[in-house]
Image (cartoon, rainbow, N blue to C red):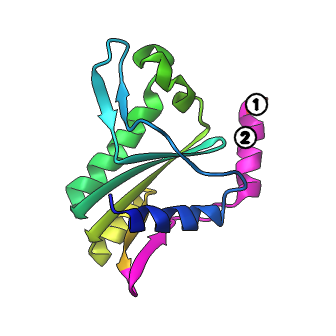
């Protein structure tokens, strides 16, 4: 993943997050036997929210569907499914997907949005980050409180 892509993502997310965004040191999730079971190009952590980032040069419908399906599968994992070093990731209340591409056609951006994915693509001399919905932190706080009760 290009540094300029990651920088664009971090700048966009910093507008919504009230806590610092950290790059998780590992991007491959392993089971109890240390066998890789899932992986992404980057994992970003911001408090109770986690962003899984996937970058491809040419975005295809298959990339979008596979990534969205992987996120669903990740959300189903239990702590006994993964090595203990990844347990903190399973505790996150919100898991978002960010798909990045140099060649990311407009119709595929719409499909990514429909699947709830953020999209990142070049435009106007830099990378644009499109968020599929309002990352309203007051709604996020309500969600966090709901899960705590």
Up-down relation of residue 53 to residue 122 (above or below): above
**Residue 145 covered by magenta stretch:** yes
- At a point 48% along the width and 22% down the height, the residue shown is 85
- The residues colored magenta run 123-147
Work out how far the residue at label 1 is from the one at label 2, CA to CA, in angstroms: 6 Å
Which image quadrant: the N terminus?
bottom left
**How many numbered discs, if any?**
2
Which image quadrant: the C terminus?
top right
* Left or right: 146 as drawn, with respect to 12: right
**In this figure, which residue is indicated by the disc labeled 2?**
144
Up-down relation of residue 81 to residue 43 (above or below): above
Give the secondary structure at mark 1.
helix
- Residue 52 position, x and y percent, is 44, 47
> Crowding at label 1, few (<14), some or many (≥20) Cα neighbours within 10 Å?
few
- Residue 130 position, x and y percent, is 48, 70
- At a point 49% along the width and 17% down the height, the residue shown is 84
* Left or right: 91 as drawn, with respect to 33: right
View extreme (bottom): residue: 124
Give the secondary structure at mark 2.
helix
Q: Is residue 59 visible?
A: no
- Residue 14 position, x and y percent, is 63, 62
**Residue 1 covered by magenta stretch:** no
Does the CB distance between marks 1 and 2 fall below 8 Å? Answer: yes
* Numbered label attached to residue 7: none
**In this figure, which residue is indicated by the disc labeled 1?**
148
* Left or right: 49 as drawn, with respect to 83: right
Q: Is residue 95 visible?
A: yes
Up-down relation of residue 53 to residue 120 (above or below): above
Q: Nearer the viewer, residue 107 or 80?
A: 80
């Amino acid at each position: 993943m290009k540094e300029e892509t990651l920088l664009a993502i971090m700048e966009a997310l910093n507008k919504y997050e009230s806590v610092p965004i950290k790059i998780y040191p590992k991007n491959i999730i392993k089971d109890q036997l240390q066998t890789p079971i899932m992986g992404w190009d980057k994992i970003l952590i911001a408090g109770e929210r986690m962003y899984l980032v996937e970058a491809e040069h040419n975005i295809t419908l298959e990339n979008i569907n596979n990534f969205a399906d992987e996120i669903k599968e990740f959300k189903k994992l239990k702590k006994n499914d993964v090595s203990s070093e990844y347990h903190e990731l399973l505790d996150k209340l919100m898991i978002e997907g960010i798909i990045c591409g140099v060649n990311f056609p407009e119709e595929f951006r719409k499909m990514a949005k429909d699947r709830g994915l953020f999209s990142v693509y070049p435009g106007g001399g830099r990378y644009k980050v499109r968020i599929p919905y309002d990352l309203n932190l007051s709604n996020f706080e309500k969600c966090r409180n709901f899960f705590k009760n």
